[in-house]
Image (spheres, rainbow, N blue to C red):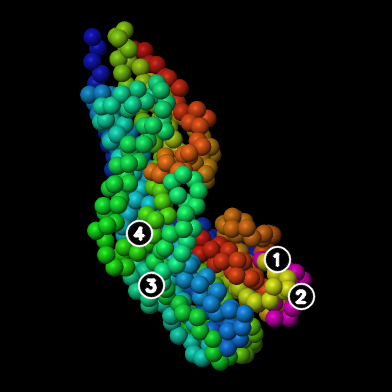
Amino acid sequence: MDDIMKSSENNAGYMKLIGTSSPGLIMILLDQSGSMQDDEKAQYASQAVNRVVYEIMVASRSGEQIKDRCYIGVIGYGASVYPIAGGKISEVAANPIRIETIEKMVPDKAGGLVSVNMDMPIWIEPRAENGTPMAEAFEKAYALIEKWVGDNPNSFPPIIMNVTDGEPNDPAKAKSAATRLMSLGTSDGKALLFNAHITGSKASAETQLPSSVSGVSDSYAKFLFEISSEIPPRLLQEAQKVGLSPQTSARGLIFNAKAETLIKFLTFGSSVAR
Amino acid sequence: MKKLEVKLHIKEAIPKINESPSDCQDAIAANSQTGRFAVADGVARSFFPAEWSRLLVEQFCFDTSNLNLALLKTRNWQDWLTPIQDKWSVSIQEKVSKKTGMASVHLKNSLLSNEPAASTFTGIQIQSNGQGNFDWQGMVIGDSCLFHFRDNKINSYLVKSSLDFNYHPEYFSSVPLYHLNKSWEEQQIIENAPEQR
């Protein structure tokens, strides 16, 4: 197994704090293959990613300004592999594709809840067409991150979160590309690749952050386990805070995840930027 | 009658590792006339913390109301915070109303959500006790530490070790909602600490 997967080496580092002089990188790879149209997976996945980008933006605020503590990248893969959004968080924040008005329940001043209309920026629209060029998505991410770590050699390592609902077009090629992606890194450690497999089936049992391959029964889950980084100790605490239950040596993988678990996963995976 | 001599050595705020000086949300105020001095550290991820920390220290050091002047005796923190919270709210609403376009969206959402600013607070009051000596009292809210140097000794309030700092400190909130059920007597506030010379 690659050096990446040995817990002692993988857990070294991952202590750097991100900030304006040492920004972090959160990259999300979003499956937009044809099967994502089933069970509204494309809708809830794009909503989840929009929400995470918004929350990172708000967490990067200092008064009125958005401080560039973090870079964001979102790559879609389906009919093609293409960048959906990317750049410094202030740049991404300033350039949504549209604004959507939604109704939200918020605390009122008396300790109750009140409904308000909020304008929410939208960066990602749901799409679902063609196959699953996951390998090409990893390769695209590699090209972008290789440059980023060159420019930010001492930052907290990049975190890549891959959201998918099915097997890649070419599993062997995807595994090779994922391994190569995880070989990138900074002085604080290797890049972290976390995988979220989503399903619309309420009957399927979820697997959350397994610590060994014996903890997953599905062959595709085993594939994703092998391309999921071990979660560093600092991030294990963040996983617990959002309600996930990682064990020591847990991998950044959720399988058969429903919408709520996907939100938790993306929240924990981007916690260094909050 | 002895006169209190105050020498202020105010060092500029030092930003966290990986952050720049402009990211600091700290505030400091000093009033030698009344013997009141205060430092506040705004919580970076909260909503307009720099404004909040500034209002806190200025209120403590310069406000002439009985509510403020008697604060360390009455410990009426809830009522003491109210006018400061009102000032913060007015200031933030004015700032946000001037913003347009994408720059305003997230700010307006946070206003609608009643998101608060949060800050630690450390304040001390040094006063003559009318008997030729000076007493001092203080309060510490949040992950702060007050050091008292005297006769080659150091006392620290309230923590005695860096290990006593935790990840869930108390703070003053700019929105009353977040203090609705707080009992300030339960908070760690410095006891009267008379000093005789």
x then y, percent, for residue A42:
55, 79
Chain on which label 4 sits = B
Q: In this figure, which residue is indicated by the disc labeled 1?
A: A211
Residue at the image point whose x is 46% and y is 64% from the top: A103
Disc 3 marks a residue whose amino acid type is Ile
Residue at the image point whose x is 51% and y is 32% from the top: B183
x then y, percent, for residue A176:
60, 84
Disc 2 marks a residue whose amino acid type is Ser
Q: In this figure, which residue is indicated by the disc labeled 2?
A: A217
Q: Nearer the viewer, mark 4 or mark 1?
A: 4
Front residue of B100/A217: it is B100
Instruction: Look at the numbered discs 4 and 2 and tell me whether their residues touch, using CB distance below 8 Å.
Output: no
Q: Are marks 4 and 3 on the same chain?
A: no
Chain on which label 1 sits = A
Residue at the image point whose x is 30% and y is 52% from the top: B93
Q: Which mark is residue A99?
A: 3
Q: Residues within 10 Å of mark 4 (few under 14, many from 20)?
A: some
Q: Nearer the viewer, mark 1 or mark 2?
A: 2
